[in-house]
Amino acid sequence: MIKEHTAGNPMDETQKWTNLTRANMSDLLAREGFKVSRNVVRKLLKNNGYVKRKPLKNKAGGGHVDRNSQFERIAELKDIYTAEGNPILSVDTKKKEKIGNLSREGKIYTTETVEVYDHDFPSLAEGVAVPHTVYDQARNEAYVTVGTSRDTSEFACDSLRHWWYNYGILYYANATSILMRMDGGGSNSSRHYIFKQDLQALATEIGVEIRVAHYPPYTSKWNPVEHKAFPHITRALQGVVLTSHQLTKELIETTTTKKGLKVFASINTFANFDLSQK
């Protein structure tokens, strides 16, 4: 019945899929004289190995000849910093969130329907929230600085500065060096001199060496903040209309997990406008 509506992987004969819905299959069966419900169709599909799935983002978009050696070096640095009692941070900027009466993914419990604009055009937004995140895996704590304009190197360093003066200097008073693991793009680009310049200025200011370990190209998903903090922050924001930066901050701070993740948030009110990042 579904043979004409089935495709498959030419390299793996066991991997097949169909574009028919359960309702379509129920109708096709009815034409053949078999009147069955959608639930029966679901059971038949399951018995034949068909389960509804969505594509899994798991394949790298490219590679790098030094990928493995860089991962080994990052692991080596992690062991060294752990033994010395120095902080190891995972740093990245989460997806920007539009501020305003705009629709958002997810559902929440409400007593009435929440009405928003019928389109999500950027021009309808009242602003943007840029959640730059510093994650301390040893403490299982994330520190989010909500930017109000652009994700620049200056903003990234403002976020790191905020972490140090409000948390780092208390937890790691005897630190001689800080290890920061991050990808090679965005505000912390491995290619932009401006980030290195701003980071050096920060290191000089706080009197502590800062060492950056960039993940190889196409491997940013291995950065701990990507899977230890971001999914949970996303869940805290899901379905809520973000009408202000303050509300965004408060929702981010409600993030928690069964493993004890704590999230602290603040709002960065500087302009964060850097012409070199245009």
Image (cartoon, rainbow, N blue to C red):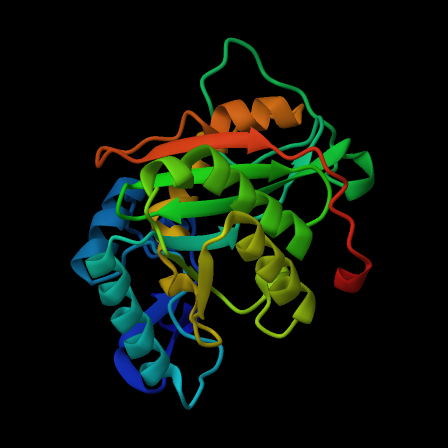
Asked if residue 25 shows in the view, the reply is: no
Where 225 sits versus 127, above or below?
A: below
Quarter where residue 222 is shown:
bottom left
Labels in figure, total: 0
Judged from this view, the residue extending furthest toward the left is: 47
Q: Residue at x 59, y 36 (%)?
A: 146
Judged from this view, the residue extending furthest toward the top is: 111
Q: Nearer the viewer, residue 146 or 42?
A: 146
Q: Position of residue 242 (x, y in %)?
A: 62, 27
Q: Position of residue 135 (x, y in %)?
A: 39, 47
Quarter where residue 65 is shown:
bottom left
Q: Nearer the viewer, residue 266 or 97?
A: 266
Q: Residue at x 58, y 22 (%)?
A: 247
Where 271 sits versus 112, above or below?
A: below
Q: Quadrant of the C terminus?
A: bottom right
Q: Residue at x 32, y 42 (%)?
A: 38
Left or right of residue 62, residue 53 in this image: left
Quarter where residue 29 is shown:
bottom left
Left or right of residue 187, residue 72 in this image: left
Q: Quadrant of the N terminus?
A: bottom left
Q: Position of residue 238 (x, y in %)?
A: 49, 33
Q: Nearer the viewer, residue 139 or 105?
A: 139
Q: Position of residue 119 (x, y in %)?
A: 74, 37
Judged from this view, the residue extending furthest toward the bottom is: 65
Asked if residue 141 shows in the view, the reply is: yes
